[in-house]
Image: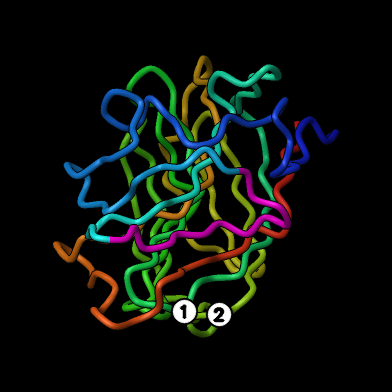
Amino acid sequence: MATVFSADFTSTRQWVAGRSSAYPRMGPTNRSDHKLDHLVPDYCPGGVFAATRRPGSDLWNCNLLTTEGSPDGFQLRPGDVMLARVTLPTALGAWPAIWTWRDGGNEIDVFEYHPDNPDLLEVSNHVRGGYRYWHGGAAGIAPGATVELRTVFGRTSVDWYANGAAVYSDRRGVGSTWHAHLIVNLSVSDGTYHPRPPVGGPSRLSWTCHSLVVER
């Protein structure tokens, strides 16, 4: 396999910052998905994705980068393998994710994480169904941990791995014609399913995507 995408989170050719068709009217907010996000058009040097409190509001200025609409317009395809190295957040309310999106769907969640469930990774196939909430404490999943992720977007099975451990094989896959853009972001939970950041707590949340490579 050859590398077909290597993320530079400052590249205006690879990424569009602060807007996505996954958000109503391209953003900047997405209250219906239980998020306190207010997207901002900022890039993410060093792969640091951040959220900062907006003065006088319960919303947070949040980083989101997507290949949708970018000059390069990269899309994942069946058979691709994604390798990502991430450091998980520690603060309540932080909601990091790497996922895919196109035309109102085509979503595969490479991972989602909430520090209130400290050893839990969430992975999902919204294309053909299938998900797992994986307790990976034995594999090193914890707030502040650095984790090596590997995701295989197979035609008949999407397979997820973390720090070399098998997380989930959905045995459904993405089919032969699937393709989708990448999204990397930090959202903030609104308290519906996971605690929102506490009043008087940190004014800045963050996580880091140290590297993201796609092989084909």
Image position, residue 2 (x, y; %): 85, 33
Q: Amino acid at mark 2?
A: Gly
Residue closest to the eye, 141 or 44: 44
Residue closest to the eye, 209 or 214: 209
**Within 10 Å of the Cα at label 1, are there few (<14), some (14-19), or many (20+) other Cα atoms?**
some
Q: Which residues are magenta?
A: 43-55
Query: Mark 1 or mark 2: which comes first in sequence?
Result: 1
User: What residue is drawn where x is 51% and y is 59%?
Assistant: 50
Element at badge 2? loop
Image position, residue 204 (x, y; %): 45, 69
Which residue is denoted by mark 1 in the rendering?
Answer: 90
User: What residue is drawn where x is 54% and y is 54%?
Assistant: 160
User: What residue is drawn where x is 73% and y is 42%?
Assistant: 7
Q: Amino acid at mark 1?
A: Thr
Magenta highlight on residue 53: yes
User: What residue is drawn where x is 78% and y is 40%?
Assistant: 6
- Please tell me whether residue 190 is drawn above or below residue 128 in the rendered image: below
Image position, residue 187 (x, y; %): 38, 54
Would residue 25 appear left or right of 144 to someone viewing this image? left
- Distance from Cα at disc 1 to Cα at disc 2: 5 Å
Q: Among all residues in the image, which is located at the extreme front? A: 56
Which residue is denoted by mark 2 in the rendering?
Answer: 144
Q: Specify the quadrant that holds the N terminus.
A: top right
Q: Among all residues in the image, which is located at the extreme right? A: 2
The label shown at residue 82 is none
Residue 32 in which image quadrant: top left
Are the residues flagged by discs 1 and 2 in contact, CB closer than 8 Å?
A: yes
Residue closest to the eye, 88 or 199: 199
